[in-house]
Image: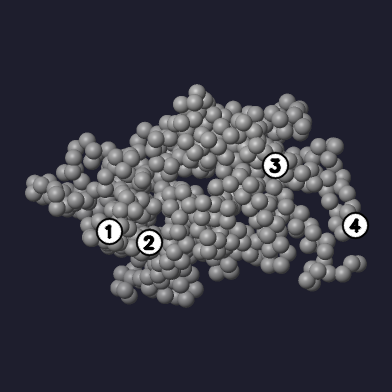
Amino acid sequence: MSLHSQSGIRASGKASQASATGSTLARVGALAVLVALLAVPFLLYPVFLMKVLCFALFACAFNLLIGFGGLLSFGHAAFFGSAAYVTAHTVKVWGLSPELGILLGTAASAFLGILFGSIAIRRQGIYFAMITLALSQMVFFLALQLPFTHGEDGIQAVPRGVLFGVFDLNNPLAMYYTVLGVFLIGFAIIWRTVHSPFGQVLKAIRENEPRAISLGYRTERYKLMAFVLSATLAGLAGGTKAIVFQLATLTDVTWQMSGEVVLMTLLGGMGTLTGPVIGAALVVTLENYLAATSLPVPVVIGCIFVACVLVFRRGIAGEIQARFGKQSRLG
Amino acid sequence: MMGTIFGIPPQALFGQLLLGLINGSFYALLSLGLAVIFGMLNVINFAHGALYMMGAFVAWLLLTQLGIGYWWALLLAPLVVGLFGVVLEKTLLSRLYKLDHLYGLLLTFGLALIVEGAFRHQYGVSGQPYPIPDALKGGQNLGFMFLPNYRGWVVVASLVVCISTWIAIEKTKLGAYLRAATENPVLVQAFGINVPRMITLTYAFGVALAGLAGVLAAPIYQVSPLMGSNLIIVVFAVVVIGGMGSILGAVLTGYGLGLLEGLTKVFYPEASNIVVFVIMAVVLMIKPAGLFGRER
């Protein structure tokens, strides 16, 4: 029994079933969003936008696992944070270029994903959540103790460097468009995965695993692949974040960070393509706002969590989808 | 000076083993509560660590605000936490039983953030000292080591609580109802037993155990809003290692892992933070259902 069959959320993205006008509308909408994304750094603070994009990619990666594979990972900060550390270290200490640093960070997360995935997929449901949480806490302690992560200080003052030897990332606009490019690549990979036969098999496993097994699918292998892909993309987000903020710290590997990405996805809508992006934008905005007030952030975040679980399980994108049908989707 | 054991002075070895046993006592009490709650509600109570912290804080507040001492706190703090649990179960958790179990985890995660955040907002992150009660001050010289009375008391008290809970569930009529309702709530309800109330009381009892553990912990560790959050993740790993099938399994795994952690502190201190997680990974490789668990 999956999270979705009971809550009534259905994964989005049956493009083939959408009517011709619907898909045209979606294309126009997607184009409009793209134009907006290109223009928005002229209106809003680029660092804020880059933070939103990094977390949006992180949430999309997480959502690939819960929304389309039905696996709730409570330890995704491990991948996000490890990639941030590896990227920061390779760029700062080894003097690599930012693109190589991000690539190595992402590769480290992929490797960690294979390791953790092969352990965690042995159990399902809440056990899976607890196992991923415990494994990521192990990464937290390693990050606290290993010499190259510099304990409480983290890796600071990471140079942004020059992308492909051409674009100086110290220029905020160049940095923004790089992050946007990374986000779009990640999003495209997720879109492609969800709409591929692989994505359909994942959905089948989510809905009814014994049946998928009886149809001859080696579900363990599919789940592991989904896990690794999700971890890799979370790493891509983390590595990019390290370059943007020139920083990798313990905050990136805490269980609170894992919880935050769960909230972004839950709030935006699990199993929708655009939901995690909306959720990430909202949570980052909210945190920016709360930082200026005296309200305790965890309490507010906790209240949103409780409210989402009790009355808003479809999330924002899920609600819109349920109200207005498929054509409102932009993904 | 006495000889050494594996190159370690026996004082240090037994000292760390005692610390491990103390930690194990808290693992056992908390994983026992988690297992009882999970058996009945099918909810993994993420708020367990926050409620453990709440128990310690209630004891501290009773002492500093009302002048009520340790022994009364040992009774009152679990009651307060248990009542809080009744409210949580009645108003929030009970709405989720028809949904996927993961929602219970998400809800209690939110609750943990709220409780912890509220205490942190009110009292800051620094720890508050809680004095050891007069009757338990001092210690015994056992010849091979010095045993502080209070630590001995914690080990004995938690053992007594764990064993009596086990007896209550396995050997009494009430426990039989509980086990029956875990297996088949609809049938038990048909026999005229008020299952929803039983569920509420089970949750209250489970979190009261966490509150009790909090009071026991207060004089050993400082009373701090963060004391529960890191502990609960280790306890989750303990629960995965033991498997949730058996009460006794949860208790034994708790003590065993506490001792192992203590041993690691002696022989390879760098790994003491992660040894439980490593063991969890190994157990999952060999026996995915956990040492005492059964596949559900």
Farthest left residue?
Answer: A20
Q: Amino acid at mark 3?
A: Ile
Which of the chains bears the disc numbered 1? A
Mark 3 vs mark 2: tell me if same chain.
Answer: no
Q: How far is the residue under mark 1 from the one under mark 3?
A: 47 Å
Instruction: State the SS at label 3.
Output: helix
Q: Residues within 10 Å of mark 4 (few under 14, many from 20)?
A: few
Q: How far is the residue under mark 3 from the one under mark 4?
A: 29 Å
Q: How far is the residue under mark 2 from the one under mark 4?
A: 55 Å
Q: The N terminus of chain B lies in which quarter of the figure?
A: bottom right
Which of the chains bears the disc numbered 3? B
Look at discs 1 and 2 and give the one toward the viewer.
1
Mark 1 vs mark 3: tell me if same chain.
Answer: no
Left or right of A320, for residue B104:
right
Residue at point 59% right, 27% down? B83
- Of labels 1 and 2, earlier in sequence is 1
Instruction: State the SS at label 2.
Output: helix
Q: Residues within 10 Å of mark 3 (few under 14, many from 20)?
A: some
Q: Which residue is mark 4?
A: B143
Q: Which residue is mark 3?
A: B163
Q: Amino acid at mark 1?
A: Leu
Q: Which residue is mark 2?
A: A220
Q: Which mark is residue A215?
A: 1
Q: How far is the residue under mark 4 from the one under mark 1?
A: 67 Å
Q: Which mark is residue A170?
A: none
